[in-house]
Amino acid sequence: VIPVVNTTQQPPMSQLSTRGTREKLLNTSMIRGARGGEFDNRNVVLQLAKLRAERAELLGYDSYAAYSLEDQTAKDTASVNKLLGDLTAPAVRNAKKEAAEIQAVIDAEKGGFQVAAQDWNYYSDKVRTAKYAFDANQLKPYFEFNNVLEKGAFFAATQLWGITFKQRTDLPTYDPDVRVYDVFEENGEHLAIFVIDPYARSNKRGGAWMSSLVDQSFLLNQKPVITNNLNLTKPAAGEPTLLTWDEVRTTFHELGHATHGWFSKVKYPRFSGTNVPRDYVELPSQVYEMWMAWPEV
Ligand SMILES: [Zn+2]
C-alpha cells in the first residue's frame, strides 16, 4: 500500500517504475477532498470564496484579491498579473524543453507512450542521471550536519554581521536532540536564543520551518527565542548525520528566517520578526540560501 501524503507532490512518483501505479497515485492525490462523503471539501471552499467576496465588497474593494494585496508589497492585482504574465512564456518554454528530453528517454526505452504528468518526476531523474551522471548521494559525505550548521550557516552569519553563537546546555528542551544556542551581537551583547530541532520524529510535522517561541518586543522588553525545525533522518547511534545538497539548502534557508527573527527591532510584537507581508517573508531566507555555495563559506 502506498499512502497519499499531505503535500501536493507524492515522493514515490520519482521511483515507481510501473506507469499505471504512477497514474493511480497521481489521480488519487489529485481528487483528495473531492470524492464525496464527509471529507469532501468542495462546499467548504465555495463558502470560503463567497465569504471572502462578501468581506471585500463590504470594505469597498473590487475583489478579495485586491483587498488582500493592499498591505502586501505587490499592492494590487495588476502587478501580480504582470509578474505571472512575464513568467508564463519562459516557464512554458522550459517545460516544453524538459518534456522533449523526457520523451527522448521514453522513446529510447521503447516506451511507446507520450509523456504525461505521472511520468515527469520518474523520468526527470533518469534524464539527470543520463545527462550529468549525477548521483546526489555521492555529495553527502561532504555535508555533515554539525559542520553545515556551525561552520557553514553560523559562519556565514558571523562573516556578514559579526554575530557569534555559543551552545548552552542549561536550558530544558522537549527532546534530547534539540539544541539551544545563545546568539551574541558583534559587541558581545546578547541578541537572541536559537533552538534547533533537526530530526524527524513520528509525532513531528513534516517539512522544515522557522518559528518564534518568544517574539522580540521593546514594549514587553522581550528578546527573541527563535526555532528552526528540520526533518533530517536520524542516523544510527555513533554515525554522522550526512545531508543532501537540498537538505543543506534547507538548513541555510531556515537559518535565513531565523536571522529575520533575531534582528527584529520593533515595539509591538504584532510586527516582530517574520510578521511582515507574505510576499516579502521569503526574501531573507532565499537570499541566505545563496551563502551555502559562496566560496568563502
Ligand atoms: Zn521559507
Image (spheres, rainbow, N blue to C red):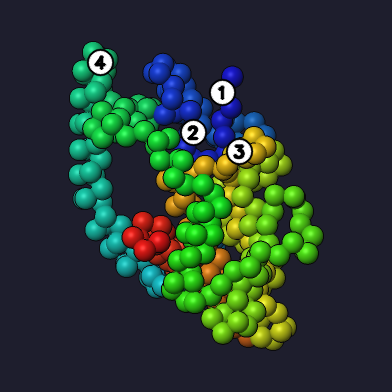
Looking at the rendering, which quadrant does residue 3 occupy?
top right
| Mark 1 and mark 4: Cα distance apart in space | 26 Å
For image coordinates 47% across by 50% down, the residue present is 248
Sequence-first disc among 2 and 1: 1
Image vertical order of residue 270 relative to residue 23, above or below: below
State whether residue 111 appears in this view. yes
Measured Cα–Cα span from mark 2 to mark 3: 29 Å
Q: Which residue is mark 3?
A: 239
Q: Nearer the viewer, mark 2 or mark 3?
A: 3
Kindly identify which residue carries mark 1: 2
Q: Amino acid at mark 1?
A: Ile
Image location of residue 208, percent across then percent down? 56, 51
Q: Are marks 2 and 1 in contact (CB under 8 Å)?
A: yes
Sequence-wise, the earlier of marks 1 and 3 is 1
Q: Nearer the viewer, mark 1 or mark 4?
A: 4
First reached walking from the N terminus: tag 2 or tag 3: 2
Residue 226 lies, in percent from the top left, at 63, 66
Q: CA distance from mark 2 to mark 4?
A: 24 Å
Secondary structure state at the residue bearing disc 1:
loop
Looking at the rendered image, the disc whose residue lies closer to the viewer, 3 or 4, is 3
Residue 23 lies, in percent from the top left, at: 42, 23
Residue occupied by mark 2: 10
Task: Tell me which residue sits at (49%, 33%) in the image.
Answer: 10
